[in-house]
Amino acid sequence: MSRPSLKEIKETSIRDRYYPYETWIDSIFSPISPYLAWLFIRLNISGNGVSWISGFIAIIAGILMATESSILIFIGSFGYVIFYQLDYVDGAVARLNKKTGVGGQYIDFIMHVISHVAIISGLALGAISQLGSAIYPFAILALVASGLNHARHSIAWFAIVMEQQKRKAKG
């Protein structure tokens, strides 16, 4: 399989997305994503691999944010930004490798849940270590909210998977 050029990556990354790049956040993260997609393709890392890496980075960021070290908290604070940047890359890598599917979309979704819960957990544990038991109710609410934030999407994923299975059964 020939490796796509940076120009092809830029075109494919934007053209074949499920949603167009339209928000101010997209204007920050989308210009960098083709270069990272190019790198991951050269390193032979799949779109799912990029998703797993992003989740791992978010977990490490959460752990760093739970510490009492200002420098580690500062470093950890970039973990969510890196996760978010890689979220722009995983789909592009999958599309360029012609390996897209519901499974990859589900892994991407799960990494969103993991990243949010990991970051909020780190912040909650850091707050507890600094403020003690008075912060427990807020920490618990933050953890529950971060997990429930994605619960509404679970029904949508179930519908997508069932539709995919129905299409496969019909051939």
Image (tube, rainbow, N blue to C red):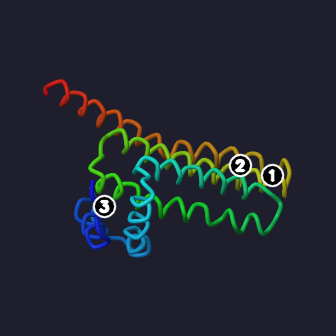
Residue holding disc 3: 3
Q: Residue at x 62, y 66 (%)?
A: 78
Q: Residue at x 29, y 57 (%)?
A: 96
Q: Relative to 159, is 108 on the left or the right?
A: right
From the top left corner, tell me how far across and down residue 37 is, in percent.
39, 63
From the top left corner, tell me how far across and down residue 117 is, in percent.
60, 47
* Image quadrant in which you'd find residue 107: top left
Residues at discs 1 and 2 in contact (Cβ within 8 Å):
yes
Above or below, 69 against 139 in this view is below
Q: Residues within 10 Å of mark 2 (few under 14, many from 20)?
A: many
From the top left corner, tell me how far across and down residue 2 is, in percent.
27, 58
Element assignment for label 1: helix
Above or below, 123 against 36 in this view is above
Q: Amino acid at mark 2?
A: Ala
From the top left corner, tell me how far across and down residue 31 is, in percent.
38, 74
Q: Residue furthest top?
A: 169
Residue holding disc 1: 128
> In which quadrant will I find the C terminus?
top left
Q: Relative to 157, is 43 on the left or the right?
A: right
* Image quadrant in which you'd find residue 80: bottom right
Q: Residues within 10 Å of mark 3 (few under 14, many from 20)?
A: few
Q: Amino acid at mark 3?
A: Arg
Q: Give the spatial CA distance, label 3 vs label 1.
A: 49 Å
* Mark count: 3
Element assignment for label 3: loop
Q: Residue at x 76, y 54 (%)?
A: 66
Q: Residues within 10 Å of mark 1 (few under 14, many from 20)?
A: some
Label located before the other in sequence (1 or 2):
1
Residue holding disc 2: 139
Q: Give the spatial CA distance, label 1 vs label 2.
A: 8 Å
Q: Amino acid at mark 1?
A: Ile
Label located before the other in sequence (3 or 2):
3
